[in-house]
Image (spheres, helix red, strand yellow):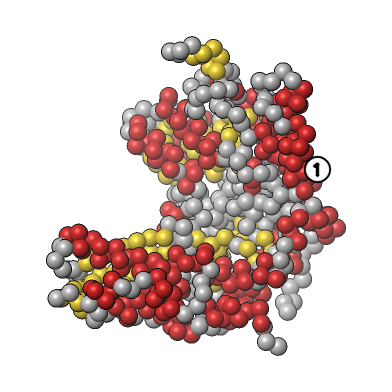
Amino acid sequence: MSAIVKPQTHGLSQADVARIRADFPILDERPHGKKLVFLDSAASSQKPVQVIEAMDDYYRRYHANIHRGVYHISELATEAYEEARASVARFIGTPCAAECIFVRNATEGLNLVAYSWGRTNVRRGDAIVLTEMEHHSNLVPWQVLAQETGAQLRFVPVTDDGRLDLRNLDALLDGAKLFAFTAVSNTLGTINPVSDLAARARAAGAISIVDACQAVPRMPVDVTQWGADFIAFSGHKMLGPTGIGILWGRKALLDAMPPFLTGGGMIGVVELTHSTYADVPARFEAGTPAIAEAVGLAAAVRYLEAVGMERIHQYELYLAEYAMERLLRIPAVKLYGPPMSDRTGVISMTVGDIHAHDLASILDSEGVCVRAGHHCNQPLMEKLGVPATARASFYLYNTPEEVDALVSAIEKAKRIFKIA
Amino acid sequence: MTDNTFTGMDELYRDFILDHYRNPRNAGIIENPDASYEALNPLCGDKIRMDLKINDGVVTDIKFKGRGCAISQASASLLTEQIKGKSLAEINKVGKDDVLANVGINISAARLKCALLGLKVLKSALALKYVEDPDI
């Protein structure tokens, strides 16, 4: 075995992680008779029993539609839903809960901004600035907006080591209405300088929109410190359920925006031919929302707060550093992205001429779950010149032993493909 | 010690599969093909293009160009070997089971699309050709 001495645990102790793991029932599963080694949390995290039970409790004891019933359990449900909003607001550092809109996921949040703010404010000839490392969810809505309005798309390039090349940013932002960028690359793990980018957008007269999907689950995020105008993230990547996400926006911007989806729940007064709309946030939450999911998300937020976001971040960096150190010692392994100083626990790799899908299949036969493919990031993959990578991502419940399991599964893949 | 747990993967990636992956037969493109098609598996980015020469209802030449996993590329390579020199009537009868027999293993549902991409491209190329020229 390797002679590498594992670095001292940062953030969380072995005992902390053991306690955390005991909260995640799925970690006891044994796919193909192997211990489950789940290294795909950047795609979707697993759920602690506290989240599962909070949703179960809601359905068993106080499910009813919200903001409508005058009876007791409807009041309980309404209270829980609004408390969930307040929990999320506290978690991301905004004093104003109404700035947090419940949406289905980050994709819906970004579409909400593109449709509502975008179609009101973007005109022919305006520029929309994006980066080359955007997830398709923060790319396609802007492509559609540009096609509809005649606006022009501009891209901040990515350097060979996976960072944003900001040398021409001011020129790119000249004449821009909006700058949409990711806080953390889902493929390369790159952490972008959000406050700096938001400030430069503001100086150029553009609003800034942050895809925070990979940031909010794994590092302390304070929207007042970031200084952006909108941020979007998904609940299911941060221990919460699927089907719920958050769009945070500055109150003044949200107040001036027309509805995105229309119908019940978002109205003021409805007459047969016209209606007035409710105030923010209700204006953007048409129809019966995902109440159980909001309750689950609030439980997830409580869980993350109890562990501590800074500790989670440190622990993930510790795991990523250990993984990179071990992986770099395997001949034929190639890692993509910036050095540890600028990244999170997301590691994209190729192994010799083994295609990422074959690699992931072989790792799966050992119980190791990684993502394979283009990670909803096709233009970036083209730029890197690889058809697909395998991506391992770490979270608070992973262990150094699971990194070892990844390494030995890669060794097996190499044996099967007869790679020295 | 034998690693029993690994038999499944050893069976999937047998020598001839790796050989067809690394040394694909009938690789390349045909200038002025009689039929041609390219398809992408958007989930994984696997891509295959096939070009065919057809004379008197017989596929006299076929070439493919692609990128992707060992299963998709080897399966396409094996398919081109199987159909080269065959009549269109014979090729019409080639289906999913033949392709899976070529690859020679039970493929999990998640990888079935990879194994069948080449067949999809071949059938699409011929279908387009039929639309253009029903008498072929």
Height in image: B22 above or below A358? below
Estimate how packed mark 1 is, as few (under 14), some (14 to 19) or many (20 or more) residues with alpha carbons within 10 Å.
few
> Residue A43: x, y in percent?
59, 52
Residue farthest to the bottom, as pictured: B1
Residue at left offset 50%, top offset 67% = B111
Quadrant the C terminus of chain B occupies: bottom left
Front-lying residue, A370 or B59: B59
> Residue B68: x, y in percent?
43, 68
As drawn, is A56 to the left or to the right of B91?
A: right
Residue at left offset 52%, top offset 65% = B109
Front-lying residue, A163 or A77: A77
Q: What residue would you read off at disc 1?
A: A306
Using the rendered view, name the quadrant where residue A68 is placed: top right
Kind of residue indicated by mark 1 = Ala
Q: Can residue A244 be seen in this view?
A: yes
Height in image: A227 above or below B123? above
> Residue A240: x, y in percent?
68, 44
